Amino acid sequence: MKRTISKERLASKSKVGIVLRPSTPEIKNSYLKIKECFEKHNIKVYLERNSANMINEDGIELDTICENVDFLVSVGGDGTLISVVRRSFSYNKPVLGINLGTLGFLTDIRLNELETFLDNLDKDNYRIDSRMMIKGSANLRTFFAFNDIVISRNSLSSMIRIDAKLDGRPFNSYYGDGVIISSPTGSTAYNLSLGGPLVYPLTDAFIVTPVAPHSLTQRPLVLPADFEIEFTISDNQGAVVIVDGQDIYEIEQNQSIKIQIASKKAKLLHRRERNYFEVLNEKLQWGN
């Protein structure tokens, strides 16, 4: 099958919502430069309220911003972008990541490249990538992950047993520190640090990776995203579910966590020429 670049385009490019990396008030000078750059291109800027409070500016609640802007911008690093994607997911707004540090896996625009990017945006020379999101449900609560959902032991003194089913049929029992269920986007995160596979980010698949398994026969597994995966906690200590490293939920013994592909996808706004394998080469120093 031939891989094609998405032809999706922004319906309008006149309004943008900006979210800043939290707990970094020194980011204000960078924000003012970013705002000036957008306004130079006749794009009205709306600053998210928590970000605004941090730098003593006027701000608006993110939900209100999402209802009114054409796209969103996260300023900081990959963690900030992941948070923005999750918080704005229901509004279906593309998110651009501006990185203020080193090149990220997700945030590929540096501050000194923003002017060039906006010139290209004016010319419709950009790309919108659609990325799979994971839908999880437990205890009548539903949550969405961009990178991964981690089921982890609740006690540092003991391992945890997790029984797994695929479409209702038992397929494995994990015994160790836990299990990671990663999206292809998240394959470069916690999954990678545990020896899990890298999966091209526009693929639809789950990566199930055991954390410190008791048995060496437990290996990472890549599954088509049309499966429903169910994990049941057999350990009497219970477990915790960690969503994108940002939200934590407690799960009791014999309770289950169901994992599915979300019905919608997250959208990332990128330079047209951005190449995933060049990012891997730089971040992972392949060939060095």
Image: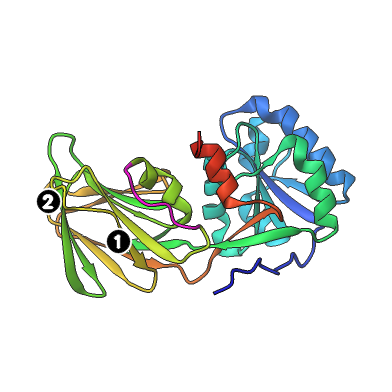
Instruction: Return the mark for residue 138.
Output: 1
Nearest the camera: 175 or 33?
175
Given residues 153 and 250, the one toward you in this image is: 153
Residue at 56% across, 49% down: 277
Is residue 46 toward the left or the right of residue 6 in the image? right
Q: First in sequence: mark 2 or mark 1?
A: 1
- Under circle 1, the secondary element is strand
Q: Which residue is mark 2?
A: 235
Is residue 138 left or right of 215 when viewed as pictured? right
The magenta span reads 194-200
214 or 260: nearer the eye?
A: 214
Left or right, residue 98 beside residue 179? right
Q: Is residue 4 visible?
A: yes
Q: Is residue 213 magenta?
A: no
Residue type, mark 1 in image = Ala
Q: Position of residue 57 (x, y in %)?
A: 73, 34
On screen, 36 above or below 148? above
Q: Main secondary structure of the magenta part?
A: loop
Give the numbered dot on residue 121: none
Residue in the picture at 61% in, 39% down? 50
Residue name at image x 64 percent, y 27 percent: 25
Work out whether residue 231 or residue 65 is closer to the camera in this orientation and state it.
231
